Amino acid sequence: MGQKDSLLVVDDEPEIVEILVEYFSGQGFDVRGAGNAAQARDVLADAAPRLAILDIRMPGEDGLSLARWIREHRREMGIIMLTTAADVVDRIIGLEMGADDYVPKPFEPRELLARVKSILRRLGEENAAPPIVAGQRPGRVRFGLCELDTDAHKLFDAAGKELPLTAMEFDLLKVFSENAGRVLSRDQLMELAHHRGWEVFDRSIDLRIMRLRRKIEPDPEKPEVIKTVRGVGYMYLADA
């Protein structure tokens, strides 16, 4: 693995934190644990983990609020939410907050490890993106008001300001860029974005598309860049 990837585990159940810290440390990760959101913020003040594993149901500030804060302040961190198996609403809200994935409790550590590795692969080793200049933009793809830098895995608005972008959102934009003008079903989007192992419900794709539209569309309520093809899926129009 080379230099150790760093993780943050946040759960109000000490035994879960202990198990995950020990397990991921044994897999070669640098892992820090926290028992609540306040402790997690203290860790984040001193360190920059590449990915956080957050329990949703915690007393005081819950994992959803912490996920929103991380997405606002540490945009390049991956986020996995731990949920109870029946909490579909929490999963949806977690995705809306910017989570990259969710794993229901009880979970198998090896499955969680696979999800962590998948997200870290997608995040890649992202370096600072070069500034947007007029003329040639190698590796840049226009999405409505924005440009996607496919090399740096970053999204920029019309003024050149970087916008928050999760790993899954990047994967979806890249898939659309490679299939302009082609109607893609939800299953095709998941397969092309290399998420075939997910326990996914259709609503998760819809929510991610909705979040992307808020960033790239002049009018998200009347999308012209990523169009909905009723009963089929979605289509990216490069010339929109």
Image (tube, grey):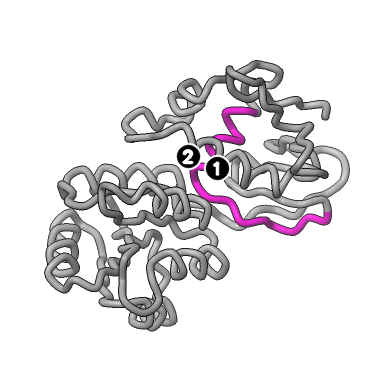
Which label is found at residue 44? none
From this view, report whether residue 21 is shown above or below residue 193: below
Q: Magenta stretch: give its range.
A: 159-176
Residue 132, position in %: x, y?
A: 78, 50
Amino acid at pointer 1: Leu
Q: Residues within 10 Å of mark 1 (few under 14, many from 20)?
A: some
32 is within the stretch colored magenta: no
- Looking at the rendered structure, the number of numbered marks drawn on it comes to 2
- What SS does tag 1 mark? helix
From this view, report whether residue 139 is shown above or below residue 233: below
Residue 111, position in %: x, y?
A: 21, 43
Residue 158, position in %: x, y?
A: 82, 51
Amino acid at pointer 2: Ser
Asked where in the image residue 169 lies, by quadrant, the reply is top right
- What SS does tag 2 mark? helix
From this view, report whether residue 136 is shown above or below residue 62: above
At 51% from the left edge and 36% from the top edge, which residue is drawn?
Answer: 205
Residue 201, position in %: x, y?
A: 41, 34
Which label is found at residue 204? 2
Question: Where is mark 1, residue-wise?
Answer: 207
Q: Are marks 2 and 1 in contact (CB under 8 Å)?
A: yes
